[in-house]
């Protein structure tokens, strides 16, 4: 009996992503509290970031529906989604996570959490590149979509 070799669906990316979440939650807080004015500014800027992140995650998840998977390789029965929030950014779920990480870091006033949020930008950029390579294999029209729609922030990046 022949066994099928394991197909890489990007499990290592998901494991690393969980590690980022754990680091963000447990980021050491060795530095003292920020000055009160900076704490207020951090909360004022951070909370809207959290709200934007939650909105992106909600809209992207809802729109993907059955296509949703934590793995970067698209499911066999997936369909390409290019409208709605996906007409504004290619990766609203990754954008949402990044906004949440930055917002919560600013609101908590912790430099270590800001460092994790910065690292998350690089991580999700790399994960998106891997995912997009698989999407282009599956959907040749994805290349045109990628030229039209920004990756994380409409009109910027």
Image: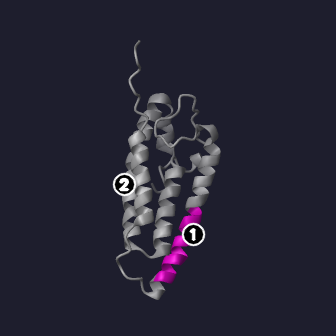
For the magenta stretch, what is the residue range? Answer: 39-52
Front residue of 14/98: it is 14
Q: Name the residue beneath numbered marker 2.
A: 122
Foreground pick, 147 / 51: 51
Q: In this view, does 153 lie to the left or right of 82?
A: left
The residue positioned 47% from the left and 59% from the top of the image is: 98
Q: Residue at 46% across / 57% down in the picture?
A: 156
Which residue corresponds to the image point at 42% horizontal and 65% vertical from the top-left? 26
Q: Is residue 154 visible to the viewer in this orientation of the structure?
A: no
- Give the answer, above or below, for where 110 lies relative to 125: below
Contact (CB < 8 A) between labels 2 and 1? no
Which image quarter is the N terminus in?
top left
Q: How crowded is mark 1: few (under 14 residues within 10 Å), some or many (20 or more)?
A: some
Q: In the image, is residue 124 above or below residue 40?
A: above
Quadrant of the rendering where the C terminus is positioned: bottom left
- Point out the tag, 2 or 1, that comes first from the N-terminus: 1
Q: Residue 48 carries which label?
A: 1
Q: Secondary structure beneath disc 1?
A: helix
Which structural element holds mark 2? helix
Quadrant in the picture for residue 55: bottom right
* 75 left or right, relative to 118: right
Residue 143 in magenta stretch: no
The percent position of residue 67, horizontal first and vertical second, equals 59, 37
Where does residue 139 sit, x and y in percent of width and height? 50, 30
- At 62% from the left edge and 38% from the top edge, which residue is drawn? 66
The residues tagged by marks 2 and 1 sit, at their Cα atoms, a distance apart of 22 Å
Taking the image as drawn, is residue 30 in sight? yes
């Amino acid at each position: 009996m022949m066994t099928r070799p394991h197909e890489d669906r990007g499990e290592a990316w998901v494991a690393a992503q969980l590690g980022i979440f754990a680091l963000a939650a447990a980021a050491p807080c060795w530095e003292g509290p920020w000055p009160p004015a900076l704490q207020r500014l951090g909360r004022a800027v951070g909370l809207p970031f959290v709200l934007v992140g939650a909105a992106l995650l909600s809209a992207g998840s809802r729109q993907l529906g059955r296509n949703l998977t934590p793995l970067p390789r698209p499911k066999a029965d997936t369909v390409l989604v290019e409208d709605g929030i996906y007409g504004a950014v290619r990766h609203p779920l990754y954008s949402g996570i990044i906004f949440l990480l930055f917002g919560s870091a600013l609101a908590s006033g912790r430099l270590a959490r800001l460092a994790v949020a910065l690292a998350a930008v690089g991580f999700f950029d790399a994960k998106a590149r891997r995912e997009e390579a698989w999407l282009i294999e599956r959907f040749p029209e994805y290349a045109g979509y990628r030229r039209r729609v920004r990756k994380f922030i409409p009109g910027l990046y």
